[in-house]
Amino acid sequence: MAAPLVVRERVDLHAAEIGLTPRRLVGMTLAVGLTLIFLLGMAGGIMKAAQGNLIQLQPQTFYALLTLHGAGMISTVVLLTAIALWYVLQEQLGLKPEVLLFGVVAIVWGLLAAAVAVLIGGFGPAWTFLYPLPFLGTWPAWSTGLFFFGVLFVGIGFAVFCLDLMAGIIRTYGGVLNGLAWDTWIPALRRKDGKVAPPQVIAATMVAIDGLITVAAGSVLVIALLAHWFSPRFPIDPLWIKNLTYFFGHTIANLAIYVSAGVIYAVLPAYTGRTWHTNKVYALSWAISLIFVPWAWPHHLYMDFVQAPWLQIGGEASTYIATIPATVVTIFGSLLLVYRSRMRWRLGSTMFMAGILGWLVGGIAAMLDATIPFNEVLHNTLWVPAHFHTYLLGGVFLFVLGFASYFIGERPVEGPWLKSIEWCFFTGLVGFLLMFYAGGIEGVPRREAVQPAPGPILAEIATGFVVLLLIGLVAMLIEFWLRARSSAAVERERSA
Ligand code: HEM
Ligand SMILES: [Cu+2]
């Protein structure tokens, strides 16, 4: 039976009948993206099972899966958070689904190319494809080239999203500085109509600017690698390309958090009944992130003794400066929003609040790793996947699930079915993460098909938690599908 739904968006039923509406585009992208996350999560579970000696996997197959899982997850999460932010801003900024469709299609093509390179070609130098590894493996040359084209397409898709946002912000707020709400500090920028950008627009402006810088660097990187692929005589300096690789890789993964912050600002108020207002502190915090996020990448190169010392120190400082202000205002702001607010605890709001916790814990673990004396012992141990899975899987991905739940519409009352899904999912998630941290503390190296002890036993336990996590995820996707069907039925009844 069709359950009555709360937290519903205004739906333009007439437009829905004639073609590409925002809701259709977002609904389709969510369906594709969440399915991909599930499949790539299975690949993650297979890797753990192999590390735990529960199944046998050729090392080449392990490294191919690792590459597909990493590149695929990052691209899919970029796609899903982008579509969510786009959706919450499209009305306000007058964004058109036709434009974003290009971006979505480019990312999906990029993902397909990468999947073919990995699954058929066996391409497997890990998702960071650090030079010269892509050219040294046992895989055929075509798979190397195809993978790079895939990355290029994902970059192009993300650039479409950034440009679309930027154009909308300039149209609506008169300029980028107003999009960043610098008018709260600089009276000369104030608009006559008194319109000030809300926090989600500030986040979107920051993401659009840093996102375009990141894609520009990523394009130089991939084009240089493609040139070397066409003609091996094309020279590549290993230190230069390593810097560029991490500039691109670190920043694009990091930006997913800032995109999600925009979604939190827009969606959490629907559950608490209070809105989030721009003030000087928000504008300043986001300005600091805007400037420092692109300077944090050198924390991946502490082991490279040829790297200039000022970049090492600068990278460490920038990591702190970029992370702290926006994280603090978002976490503090969301607590204020929820505190004594009669928050409606539904699947969506639970996901958002749990995701904020994951962001905080993962962020602290990340900053530890980016601190030079800690990095000397944690570098390339399982501590690294521990911290980034905490804020990507236990943070960003929870925001995506929260958004999906909000987008489809919550149930007015949640029964035991939903509670058990949540228990299953979160038990799996926390257990899986803890095993990663334990491995990191024990110094088990990351990215190894065959790990030294205690890696295998931790991986064996972790596999059990992954099974719980994936069961919870499938159940949640079924729940979304059921709700989407019943809300479609409600709409059909209303329009009849
Ligand atoms: C669904 C549950 C997931 C499982 C079971 C899982 C499992 C794994 C495993 C076993 C590894 C290899 C760790 C190692 O030994 O080095 C890994 C690596 C990785 N995962 Fe996940 N993961 C999951 C979700 C995610 C999500 C949501 C993201 C990103 C949004 C993600 C991004 C990555 C990345 C970037 C790597 C590194 C790949 C590389 O080293 O090249 N994972 N994951
Ligand atoms: Cu980093």
Image (spheres, rainbow, N blue to C red):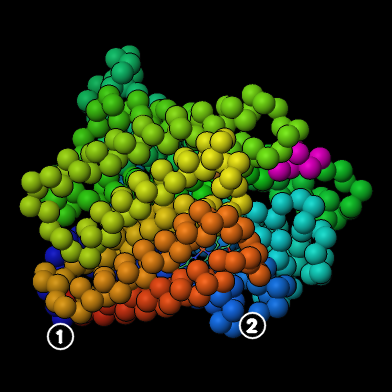
Quadrant containing the N terminus is bottom left
The quarter of the rendered structure image containing the C terminus is bottom left
Which residue has dot 2 on it? 56
Element carrying mark 1: loop
Q: Residues within 10 Å of mark 2 (few under 14, many from 20)?
A: few
Closer-to-camera residue (493/321): 321
- Residue 101, position in %: x, y? 47, 60
Give the residue displayed 7% in from the left and 52% down from the top: 342
Residue 240 on the magenta segment: yes
Q: Secondary structure at mark 2?
A: loop
Residue assigned mark 1? 1
Q: Residues within 10 Å of mark 1 (few under 14, many from 20)?
A: few
Residue at x 70%, y 66% (from the top left corner): 124
Is the CB–ligand 1 distance for label 2 below 8 Å?
no
Query: Does mark 1 have its CB less than 8 Å from ligand 1?
Result: no
Query: What residue is rendered at 82% in x and 43% in y?
Result: 236
Viewer-side residue, 278 vs 136: 136
Identify residue type, mark 1.
Answer: Met
Residue 343 image point, x, y percent:
12, 54
- Vertically, is 305 above or below 224? above
- CA gap, disc 2 and disc 1: 46 Å
Q: Specify the segment rendered in magenta.
A: 237-242
Residue 376 at x, y percent in the picture: 60, 41
Sequence order check: which comes first, mark 2 or mark 1? 1
Left or right of 490 in this view: 103? right
Left or right: 327, with 99 as reference point:
left
On the image, the x and y values in percent for residue 143 come to 75, 67
Mark whose residue sits in front, 2 or 1: 2
